[in-house]
Image (cartoon, grey):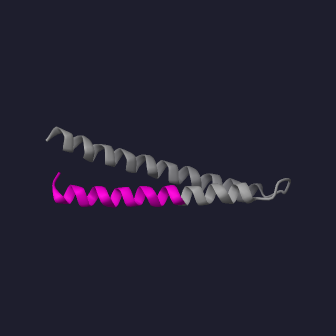
Amino acid sequence: MPLAASANLDGLYAKQQLLEHETARLEQQIMQLPQGTCDHDRQYILDLEIRALAEEAAKLNASISDILERDLQR
């Protein structure tokens, strides 16, 4: 694998890990919301943020897969 691709792959893995940690943190926040309260707005925002992070993670996964696939073709 070319050095540039390796560096790019390392960066993508680091971003992927960052997204996983942030998603877990937000999911924990949802679980810590008091039950029976009317904090639906906060839960809605957290859900949106989690979905956006999941979408970005899917894009990163596709980029990582593309790099690995190109490496296998060489």
Name which residue lies at 37% across and 56% down: 13
Place of residue 4 in the rendered image (x, y in percent of width and height, measured from the top left): 19, 59
Image: magenta residue range: 1-21
Place of residue 43 in the rendered image (x, y in percent of width and height, measured from the top left): 71, 55
User: Quadrant location of residue 72?
Assistant: top left
Q: Residue furthest top?
A: 73
Name which residue lies at 27% across and 58% down: 8
Name which residue lies at 26% across and 47% down: 67
Place of residue 27 in the rendered image (x, y in percent of width and height, measured from the top left): 63, 54
Q: Residue furthest right?
A: 36
Name which residue lies at 21% across and 43% down: 70
- Does residue 11 show up magenta in the picture? yes
Place of residue 50 in the rendered image (x, y in percent of width and height, measured from the top left): 58, 53
- Does residue 4 show up magenta in the picture? yes
What is the quadrant of the C terminus in the image?
Answer: top left
Of residues 5 and 40, the one nearer the viewer is: 5
Question: Majority secondary structure of the magenta segment?
Answer: helix
Report the number of discs.
Answer: 0
In the image, 19: left or right of 37? left
Of residues 3 and 66, the one nearer the viewer is: 3
In the image, 41: left or right of 16? right
